[in-house]
Amino acid sequence: MYAFSKAVNSMHSEDVKQLMKQASGKNLISFAGGMPNNDLFPVEQIDELYNSLSPEIKKLCFQYGPTSGYPPLVKSLESYLEKKGLIIGDNKILITTGSLQAISIITQEFVNEGDIILTENPCFVGALTVFETFGAEIHSIPIDKHGINIEALKSKIESLDRKPKFLYVTPNYHNPAGIIYSPERKKELLETLAGTGIILIEDDAYSDLYFNEEEKSLTKAMKSNGVQDVEIIYTGSFSKILGPGFRLGYMLSSEEIFEKAETVKQALDACTSSFMQILANEFLVQNKLEPYLTFLRSEYLERKDLLQQYLKTYMPEEVTWNEPKGGFYVWLKLPSHIKSTEIFNESVSRGVVFVTGRTFDPASEKDDRLRLSFSNMPKDQIEKGVIILSEAIKKVLQNSKMVLS
Ligand SMILES: Cc1ncc(COP(=O)(O)O)c(C=O)c1O
């Protein structure tokens, strides 16, 4: 028997392992994967782009690079973020191996075992796994369709005997809830945190994926307000706009936080793949991102519309859901006496997978929801998937009525 460290204990880790398997599972209709469909990737553009590189730059692809990131990519990212309204000023960018690594680095930087982290409920399960492996005490705050519940946040902060190290939120096209914070809620959140010394982690993996150009302004980052009395660490990712296989993310923070983060990253992997950073940089510099995003937005909008249409047609009336304005997710609500885990078992046996609600509850309990991702779904499978899922839900509902009667 080995004596494993506490750092490998995570309630949510098994969920994530299952999720990664199911997302890429063959012979199943999968609403599980929070990733783009393979057919959407810019394979030809990347072929052309690599072939157009000079021999010297191609050689650099194979080499180590600075821990903080490939300098031309850091520069292009600065202008990309500035176009989104973020103020770089004295802040610094650290390129990371996926934005999950940024979350992990920030946690390693600030959290000792037993420290408190505040999260939303529901919360992105990858972040929960990170917080658990660092031994954090997680306290979660419910969200509604406009964002985090401010009253619940205030009373949570007041009730704690120690100051939380940070609050982790996903304000734009939330994973799994699909919502976007209203501008008022973003403002109230900043007002609530002001002067408390609680750092805000603003995870912004999805903001480029709005469906309607007129609603783009809703995605404005809280960090773009240039607020002085809330320390905000902003994280972003290329996973949802170029491909998760790039494993490319970044964090924008004050210089002090950046410097410690750079040390943590050095100990983790020395640097993020030069190959991927060079390709991503060329994608930005050669102005390929915007046209590609336009294509992705219309593809996801189409999938979202089809999913909404079929949900309306086939779902039993006891089930409700949101209509997202961007991103990848629809968050179904079941009658409270039904567990999404029961539906999962029934649905998998019929060939359809999704992610259960309890996966995203920090306490792994609340199970009256389920997450459907439309991003990875071939359009011609959505109707069949919804029919099978709705039949599985009807079966579980019927069984529960028999038990009740
Ligand atoms: C909200 C959120 N943050 C971060 C990530 C991690 O992305 P990356 O692939 O950049 O590590 C994901 C991936 O699903 C996500 O949904």
Image (cartoon, rainbow, N blue to C red):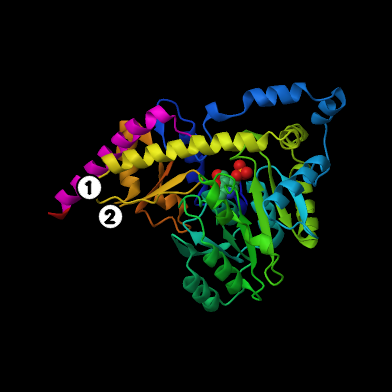
Crowding at label 1, few (<14), some or many (≥20) Cα neighbours within 10 Å?
A: many
Between 116 and 223, the one lying in front of the other is 223
Q: Answer whether residue 243 is visible to the viewer in this image.
A: no
Label 2 crowding class (10 Å Cα cut-off): few <14, some 14-19, many 20+?
A: some
**Mark before the other along the chain sequence, 2 or 1:** 2
Is 67 situated left or right of 357 in this image?
right
Report whether the residue tagged 2 is closer than 8 Å to ligand 1: no
Q: Which residues are magenta?
A: 376-403
Q: Residue furthest right?
A: 56
| Image height of 213 relative to 108, above or below | above
| Residue highlighted by disc 1 | 397
Dot 2 and dot 1 residues touching (CB under 8 Å): yes
Q: Nearer the viewer, residue 96 or 43?
A: 43
The residue where tag 2 is placed is 335
Residue found at the very far front of the displayed protein: 214
93 vs 17, nearest the viewer? 93
Q: Is residue 59 left or right of residue 324?
A: right
* Amino acid type assigned to the residue bearing label 1 in the image: Leu
